[in-house]
Amino acid sequence: MKLKEKDILVDGINISYIEEGEAEAAVIIFIHGFPFNKWKWENQIGLLKERYRVIAYDVRGHGESIANTAQMNMNQLSDDLFSFMDAIGVESAIICGLSMGGYIALSSVLSQPARIEALILCDTQCGADSDQARTKRMDVIESIQKNGLSQYAHDSVQKLFCEASLMDKLNEVSSIEQTILHTSVETIVNTLKALAARKETCSRLNQINIPVMILVGESDQITPLEAAQKMQDLITGSSLQVIEKAGHLSNLENPASFNGYLQGFLTSIQQISTRL
Ligand code: MLT
């Protein structure tokens, strides 16, 4: 399947994105995790493009969205999303974000709720980093600056995938390792700082009043099941689905199960809204 890749200049950043489906259809926008790119949503784009206008973009500094990352923070990444939506003529959309993509989605729904119709939060959390997690990120930055990305890429995949995926999903594992190695050190360092500095959103999740589905890999070590359960407790009416045989990258590790839940959720919200 050859997907259509485009780019657009938004506030001085060249945002690279994939867009498929009919222009008049309801819009779903996918936001990748750190430090990945838009191509990690290929399985989901293929599934939805007949019924939706499906968009996946590279977050500032990642993939082919070459941009200044020096002042990166979650508010800026959420502003980027809205500026990108303006630029491509999308007033409101369903947003699906994984991990960092989920942080951006949560920050966005809290700042401009009218522009988000529904949320799919995958392998993410509402908590800020603990002091220990912040210290760990600073140690990682020091090691990358001293030794480059190879060790970091190798160590990352061990944590991102569940044990079964590390043995059986060799293409996915290799693709993630290569993606990390092809991301600039500057982007990785600046994004790690932004992730370490991000604020918690748990205390405001009770403001969300749109349909929300939370997905989590059963063996996610980075944003585990308890983090997903906490969000479900705080978001009225949200649902939680656990993806078997998956770690932190549930859409890549078990696409059949992930896509089944995604399709089920989209069908259920279509039944309650004429806009979707
Ligand atoms: C991600 O996948 O986006 C990262 O693991 C997020 C994080 O490190 O907090």
Image (cartoon, helix red, strand yellow):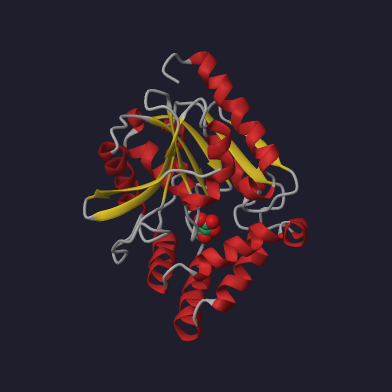
x then y, percent, for residue 223: 60, 53
Q: Residue at x 46, y 33 (%)?
A: 206
- Does residue 19 appear to the left or right of 86 in the view shown? right
- Against 51, is 11 above or below? below
Visible in this render: residue 102? yes
Q: Residue at x 56, y 74 (%)?
A: 152
Q: Along the line of sight, which residue is nearer the eye, 217 or 91?
A: 91
- Against 253, is 184 above or below? below
Q: Residue at x 34, y 31 (%)?
A: 115
Q: Quadrant of residue 166?
A: bottom right
- Does residue 174 appear to the left or right of 29 in the view shown? right
x then y, percent, for residue 270: 51, 18
How many numbered marks, from 0 up? 0
Q: Residue furthest left?
A: 11
Q: Residue at x 32, y 39 (%)?
A: 111
Which of the image's four quarters has the N terminus? Answer: top right
Visible in this render: residue 229? no
x then y, percent, for residue 186: 38, 72
- Against 200, is 51 above or below? above
Which of the image's four quarters has the C terminus? Answer: top left
Q: Residue furthest front?
A: 2
Q: Along the line of sight, which residue is nearer the eye, 212 or 197?
A: 212
Q: Along the line of sight, which residue is nearer the eye, 170 or 190?
A: 170
- Against 49, is 275 above or below? above
x then y, percent, for residue 126: 50, 47
